[in-house]
Image: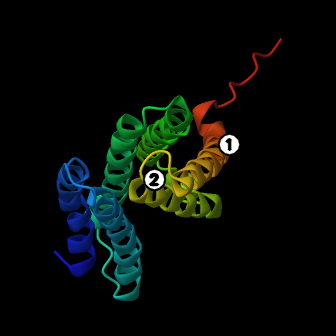
Amino acid sequence: MNLPNLLTLSRIVMIPVFVVVFYLPVEWRYIVSAIIFALAGVTDWLDGYLARKLDQTTPFGAFLDPVADKLMVAVALAVLIEEYALALLTIPATIIIGREIVISALREWMAEIGSRSSVAVSYIGKVKTTAQMAAIVGLLAFPAGNFWAWVAVALLYVAAGLTLWSMVLYLRAAWGDLFPERPQASE
């Protein structure tokens, strides 16, 4: 166990803390849950940075890091869907969650056939993650109806658009493995 892996594990530990704080019957729950989510986002960046900088990458960390990220994002989006109860928010949130499931399955399958590197994280994926994290922090920090909450909803749509774009890029990269051409029968 090393520091990057401990930071990754801390994100998973933050999930129930985040949920409990979000549902507390107090006004400060919004800002504190936003801070917890933002802290999780910082640890996501920091664990990757430290793993590379300190040469402490491990198979456990490579497995757990994306799991922790997707769990935190999916839980945050789930509580936001319930809190806002608006199709306007539910649509981009379900696009994001659905894409994460599809791409996780694709990466797992590609790893099984030895082609994992063809579906590596892209630059668009990094931009999408930044927009998504900023949108979620904004949606958590400001209650429904607040001007900044609407700005965060708009940013979530940007993230959802980038999500679809990056999914298309991943699927295009894997297309030859997903649909190999069959040899033509000779006449």
Q: Which mark is residue 172?
A: 1
User: Mark 1 or mark 2, which is nearer to you?
Assistant: 2
Mark 1 secondary-structure assignment: helix
Q: Give the mark nearer the N terminus: 1 vs 2.
A: 2
- Please identify the quadrant where the N terminus is shown: bottom left
Name the image quarter holding residue 185: top right
Residue 103 x/y as whole percent: 49, 43
Name the image quarter holding residue 127: bottom right
Name the image quarter holding residue 160: top right
Residue 176 x/y as whole percent: 66, 38
On the picture, is 144 further left or further right than 186? left
In this rendering, the answer to whether 101 lies above or below 170 is: above
Q: Amino acid at mark 1?
A: Arg
In this rendering, the answer to whether 44 lies above or below 22 is: below
Residue 126 seen:
yes
Q: Please give the name of the residue rendered at 68% of the width and 24% of the height, measured from the top-left corner.
A: 182
Q: Nearer the viewer, residue 55 or 79?
A: 79
Q: Are marks 1 and 2 in contact (CB under 8 Å)?
A: no
On the picture, is 164 further left or further right than 141? right
So how many labels did they put on this image?
A: 2
Q: Nearer the viewer, residue 26 or 165?
A: 26
In this rendering, the answer to whether 8 lies above or below 82 is: below
Q: Please give the name of the residue rendered at 26% of the width and 51% of the height, measured from the top-left corner.
A: 22
Residue 153 x/y as whole percent: 56, 48
Q: Nearer the viewer, residue 180 or 143?
A: 143
Q: Which residue position is annotated with label 2? A: 139
Q: Amino acid at mark 2?
A: Leu
Q: Which mark is residue 2?
A: none
